[in-house]
Image (cartoon, rainbow, N blue to C red):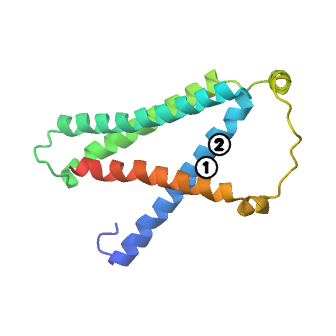
């Protein structure tokens, strides 16, 4: 363990896991968001899929709190503070969250099918009839760094994540 290491070494050790988690989280979010246009091109359905995705993210956060509350009470924790004696509850929570996540992932892969190219082309053609679409030119990756909207969306996403994550960290303490 790290308990006998200096504070700096502990911060670097745990910081590496935080960075790894954040990259994994961002990659998962990008993968989910990039799948939506493959499922449909209808703007109404895209908004609906994003709303369902955001709503389920919120529900999952609440579910973790509820499960932890039950686990702490089931383990017979008498005090209002967490300590080493509560480690089994956290371990069980980890197993439960991983199990639920794997089950949902399996169900997703079994039940959600990508729209075929023909169906997407038909949807695109239907959208084109409703509104004339101008041709898009391919961008280089460096072009994104020249776009003001890129930074605005990045800042909005970052502040949204901070707004969601900070209460998740500090709310259980109170």
Cβ atoms under marks 1 and 2 closer than 8 Å: yes
Left or right, 121 with reference to 16: right
Q: Residues within 10 Å of mark 2 (few under 14, many from 20)?
A: few
Residue 91 at x, y = what percent? Answer: 33, 45
Q: Secondary structure at mark 1?
A: helix
Q: Residue at x 84, y 27 (%)?
A: 128
Q: Position of residue 122 (x, y in %)?
A: 84, 21
SS at badge 2: helix
- Quadrant of the image for the N terminus? bottom left
- Separation of marks 1 and 2 at Cα, in angstroms: 6 Å
Is residue 66 depicted above or below 28 in this figure?
above
- Left-right relation of 110 to 15: right
Observer-nearest of 102 and 24 = 24
What's the residue at 34%, 69% (across, down)?
A: 2
Q: Is residue 160 above or below residue 9?
A: above
Tell me where residue 70 appears, x and y as whole percent. Answer: 24, 34
Residue that mark 2 sits on:
31
Q: Nearer the viewer, residue 3 or 116?
A: 116
**Residue 126 versus residue 37 in the image, above or below:** above
Query: What is the number of the mark on residue 27?
Result: 1
Residue 53 in which image quadrant: top right
């Amino acid at each position: 363990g790290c308990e006998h290491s200096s504070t700096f070494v502990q911060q670097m050790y745990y910081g590496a896991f935080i960075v790894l988690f954040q990259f994994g989280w961002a990659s998962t979010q990008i993968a989910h968001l990039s799948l939506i246009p493959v499922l449909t091109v209808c703007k109404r359905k895209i908004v609906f899929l994003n709303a369902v995705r955001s709503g389920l993210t919120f529900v999952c956060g609440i579910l973790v709190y509820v499960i932890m509350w039950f686990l702490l009470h089931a383990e017979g924790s008498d005090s209002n503070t967490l300590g080493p004696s509560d480690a089994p509850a956290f371990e069980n929570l980890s197993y439960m969250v991983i199990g639920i996540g794997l089950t949902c992932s399996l169900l997703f892969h079994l039940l959600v099918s990508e729209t075929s190219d023909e169906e997407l082309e038909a949807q695109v053609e239907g959208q084109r009839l409703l509104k004339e679409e101008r041709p898009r030119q391919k961008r280089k990756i460096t072009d994104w760094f020249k776009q003001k909207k890129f930074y605005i969306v990045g800042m909005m996403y970052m502040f949204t994540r901070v707004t969601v994550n900070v209460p998740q960290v500090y709310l259980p303490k109170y």
